[in-house]
């Protein structure tokens, strides 16, 4: 069962400097790969002339991502994109595209220095980021007689669950999005409340 997870709520950035090289981490919300890569291209246009545009993203929940990827963009293998992704995973940064725009300051940092710098830039941006919490939910359909509608609605309201649709025919069918973790509890309560009359199934 999926648990609530955090996702990036708004763009932010943070600059880290090491031996006159600057590493500017820009974080942007992204739910799809195409959106993440479009943000990368926007940064390339808006901030031309940088030495490297390294990136990493996590789409979906960090603990169970839909997708994740990274690029060193010309830096020595394993010194940029992977450390950036490691920080995103460790900090549970869901739906997050991170791009670090590096401007070379004239002094080589070595592999260890690059790993630290790219990681520090992303970590600094995450420190100032704003987050939203996503609670995975499942749509359920509840069919009952008209006399029981108010009772069912009251039960859902007590659990802060909103009815998203109501269909009236020979009975009423209410559709609601229920947190995954609460589906069994809600189902049991509604059946008890209606003496077993409520027919509950996944919504279409």
Image: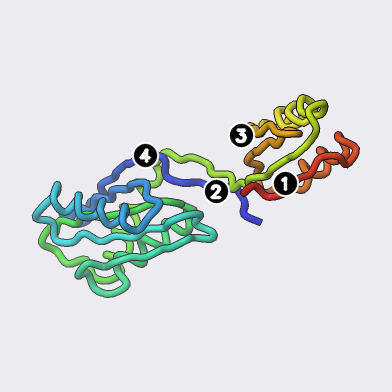
* Residue picked out by circle 1: 183
| Front of the two marks 1 and 2 | 1
Going from N to C along the chain, the mark reached first, 4 or 2, is 2
Q: Which residue is mark 4?
A: 10
Task: State the residue position of label 3.
Answer: 165
Q: Nearer the viewer, mark 1 or mark 3?
A: 3
Q: Secondary structure at mark 1?
A: helix
Q: Are marks 4 and 2 in contact (CB under 8 Å)?
A: no
**Callout 4: 10 Å neighbours few (<14), some, many (20+)?**
some
Mark 2 or 3, nearer chain start: 2
Task: Compute the Cα span from label 4 to label 2.
Answer: 16 Å
Disc with the residue nearer the chain's start (1 vs 4):
4
At x 48% / y 40%, what residue is drawn?
Answer: 132
Q: CA distance from mark 1 to mark 4?
A: 31 Å
Residue at the spot x=27%, y=71% of the render? 111
Q: Position of residue 102 (x, y in %)?
A: 19, 57
**Residue 78 image offset from top left, x and y in percent:** 32, 72
How far apart are the two marked residues, 1 and 2, measured between alpha carbons?
Answer: 18 Å
Q: Which residue is mark 2?
A: 5
Q: In the visual, does 151 lie left or right of 73? A: right
Residue sitting farthest toward the front: 170
- Which residue is nearer to you in this view: 171 or 139? 171
For marks 1 and 2, the one nearer the N-term is: 2
Q: Earlier in the sequence, mark 1 or mark 3?
A: 3
Residues under numbered marks 1 and 4 in contact, where contact means CB atoms less than 8 Å apart = no
Question: What SS does tag 3 mark?
Answer: strand
In space, the residues marked 3 and 4 are separated at their CA atoms by 30 Å
**Which of pointers 1 and 4 indicates the residue nearer the eye?**
1
């Amino acid at each position: 069962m999926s648990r609530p997870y955090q996702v990036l709520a708004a763009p932010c950035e943070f600059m880290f400097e090491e031996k006159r090289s600057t590493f500017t981490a820009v974080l942007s919300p992204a739910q799809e790969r195409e959106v993440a890569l479009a943000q990368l291209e926007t940064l390339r246009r808006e901030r031309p002339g940088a030495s490297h545009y390294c990136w990493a993203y996590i789409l979906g929940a960090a603990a169970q991502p839909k997708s994740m990827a990274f690029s060193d963009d010309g830096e020595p293998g394993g010194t940029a994109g992977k450390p950036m992704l490691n920080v995103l995973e460790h900090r549970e940064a869901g739906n997050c595209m991170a791009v670090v725009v590096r401007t070379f300051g004239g002094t080589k940092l070595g592999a260890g220095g690059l790993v630290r710098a790219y990681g520090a830039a992303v970590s600094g941006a995450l420190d100032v980021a704003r987050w939203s919490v996503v609670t995975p939910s499942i749509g359920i359909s509840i069919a009952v007689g008209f006399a029981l509608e108010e009772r069912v609605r009251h039960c859902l309201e007590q659990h802060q669950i909103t009815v998203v649709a109501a269909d009236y025919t020979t009975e009423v069918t209410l559709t609601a999005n229920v947190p995954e973790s609460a589906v069994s509890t809600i189902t049991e309560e509604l059946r008890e409340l209606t003496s077993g009359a409520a027919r509950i199934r996944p919504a279409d």
